[in-house]
Image: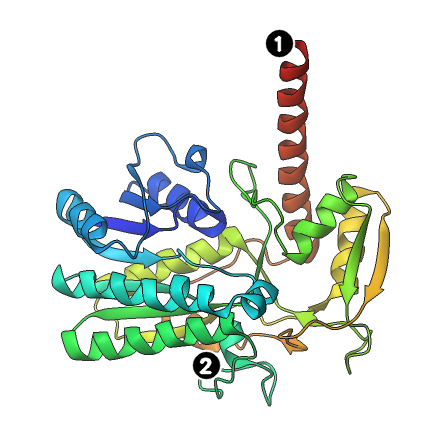
Amino acid sequence: MTVLVTGGAGYIGSHMVLALAEAGENVVVIDNLSTGFSNFIPDGVPLFIGDVSDENLVEGVIAAHHVDSIIHFAGSVVVPESMRDPLGYYRNNAMATRNLLNVAVRCNIPRFIFSSTAAVYGNPDHMPVVEEAPTRPLSPYGMSKLMAEIMLHDVATAHGMSYVVLRYFNVAGADPLARVGLATAGATHLLKIAVEAATGQRAKIDVFGTDYPTPDGTCVRDFVHVSDLVQAHRAALGYLSNGGPSTTWNCGYGRGYSVFEVIEAVRRVSGRNFAVQQADRRPGDIMTMIADTRRIHSAVAWAPQYDNLETIAAHALAWEEKLLQERRQGEGRVATG
């Protein structure tokens, strides 16, 4: 079995590729490196630089490497950016997925795992949110992911493909050994911004909205460690390989933390203070999002290892400090060269 990982040089994808390679799985990567890094790919794992919407490229990779499973991470993921550039998000998330599915059907790929998002729910009526809840996205990002989900369901029904849709809640942290992590410049992830502030790379951190009807007035999110998330994907792969029917799973811990609680966790693990500034709410932001995880736990033996906010923050901080050290060393070499 060979697994094609699209977006495998990016944040979550690189953790997935590392986990698959360590487990002895055959894996191949397609990534256009718009937000990914080729040096995140382990030695011996083939990397093809290109776009998943390029059907000729994808078909050639599938044929050459005897791919029989696809894990699809490639796409755009920033909610505020999607509000400014909706067509870009419909192109990168919906249209590219359509092309990838077209090739998957043509090549008779039996298993497909899709990286989706809790943003498809919008502001849910009940919390924690179950997979059957109405889907009412508030942003083009969430809508484009929902479009891809619908396409995958229809294609699988028509062509006998089996799939798992994983709806991520807030992915955070980094590889516990600091081998890979979130390195994209200008990332908008809360924990990434907070550890950048803790390491002196940002003068302050903005909190968008402090007047929500939540315990401290800020948005509440269910944070899931990226390494636990990729183990959920491995569980999904085994589930499909064992004949499990197509399904959709929430991927979170079922516990919510506010923006202020995340900031305080980073302050504790770093031992450093940093400025926090209150700002207006942002269009497209969801007030509270916490996963109901009963379905995934009833289907597979997924046992998260890092279900602790301070652990997640500590791993994110260690990765950020590594990036900062490498950057300074590179600047030193340039200055003395």
**Image check: 187 left or right of 200?**
left
Residue count near mark 1 (Cα–Cα under 10 Å), binned few <14, some 14–19, many ≥20: few
For residue 28, above or below residue 322: below
Q: Residue at x 54, y 67 (%)?
A: 82
Residue 190 seen in render: yes
Dot 1 corresponds to which residue?
A: 337
**Image check: 57 left or right of 190?**
left
Q: Residue at x 80, y 77 (%)?
A: 215
What element does badge 2 sit on?
Answer: loop
- Image coordinates for residue 331, horizontal then vertical, percent: 66, 21
The image quarter in which residue 207 lies: bottom right
Residue 293 seen in render: no
For residue 196, above or below residue 310: above
Q: Nearer the viewer, residue 317 or 206?
A: 206
- Image coordinates for residue 267, horizontal then vertical, percent: 81, 49
**Image check: 121 left or right of 238?**
right
Instruction: Name the amino acid type tagged 1.
Output: Gly
Instruction: Name the amino acid type tagged 2.
Output: Glu
- Image coordinates for residue 245, horizontal then vertical, percent: 25, 75
Q: Nearer the viewer, mark 1 or mark 2?
A: 1
Residue count near mark 2 (Cα–Cα under 10 Å), binned few <14, some 14–19, many ≥20: some
- Which of disc 2 and disc 1 is earlier in sequence? 2
Q: Residue at x 55, y 37 (%)?
A: 177
For residue 273, above or below residue 98: above
Dot 2 corresponds to which residue?
A: 131
